[in-house]
Image (spheres, rainbow, N blue to C red):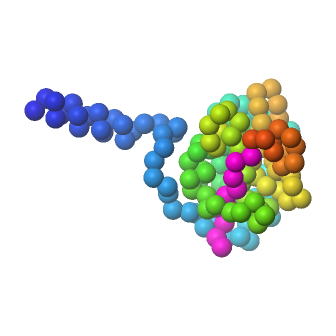
Amino acid sequence: MRALAACLLCLWLAACVGPGARGPAVAYPDIDPAHRTEVVMTALSLLDTRYRYGGAHAQRGFDCSGLVMYVFDTATGAALPHNTEQIARMSRPVPRRDLQAGDLVFFNTLGRPNSHMGIYLGDGRFINAPSTGGQVRIDRLDNPYYQRHFQSVGTLFAQ
């Protein structure tokens, strides 16, 4: 009986694992595409905000997923997790050739999928919070570093 209880406890605790845990995909949010411009404008208003690991507030700074979470909440009211992998699972895959402003770009920068992300602005540019000591900035998808680490594109907008 104790072994069964211990097993059940382990399974229950495993279900409570934090933000880095992989789980089943969640339903796509299907945000109204009319909000694309507002997403881009909100993101651009945060240019030069300082990078802060774990940050999700304009006054204190952002990391990459904190920036995306804040922008989408502010511009659309969509509540996203503060986790790149979870946001990637929430987003509907989009072919790179079909990228539109407000879509999300994902990168493998730390040797694991979806370790960095940004918001696509158009014309091959995206906004992101790249690293410690840095600031929210605009980068290009054709930058050699981002070309090497590019992974995928996703959208939270309805088709």
Q: Is residue 24 above or below residue 14?
A: below
Q: State the residue in front, 143 or 8.
A: 143
Q: Residue 157: within the magenta?
A: yes
Q: State the residue in front, 100 or 64.
A: 100
Magenta segment boundaries in residue numbering:
150-159
Q: Position of residue 116 (x, y in %)?
A: 69, 41
Q: Position of residue 7 (x, y in %)?
A: 23, 34
Q: State the residue in front, 7 or 42.
A: 7
Q: Residue 149: within the magenta?
A: no
Task: Check the image and name the residue furthest to the top.
Answer: 133
Can I make out residue 66 in this image?
no
Q: Position of residue 138 (x, y in %)?
A: 86, 45
Determine the main secondary structure of the stretch shown in magenta.
Answer: strand
| Residue at image location 82% in from the left, 35% down from the top | 135
Quarter occupied by the C terminus: bottom right
Q: Quadrant of residue 132?
A: top right
| Residue at image location 51% in from the left, 39% down from the top | 19
Task: Check the image and name the residue furthest to the left.
Answer: 1
Q: Quadrant of residue 34?
A: bottom right
Q: Position of residue 26 (x, y in %)?
A: 50, 57
Can I make out residue 150 in this image?
yes
Q: Is residue 145 above or below residue 45?
A: above
| Residue at image location 56% in from the left, 53% down from the top | 89
**Left or right position of 48 against 56:** right
Q: Quadrant of residue 59?
A: top right
| Residue at image location 71% in from the left, 70% down from the top | 33
Q: State the residue in front, 106 or 148.
A: 148
**Left or right position of 74 against 89:** right
Quarter occupied by the N terminus: top left
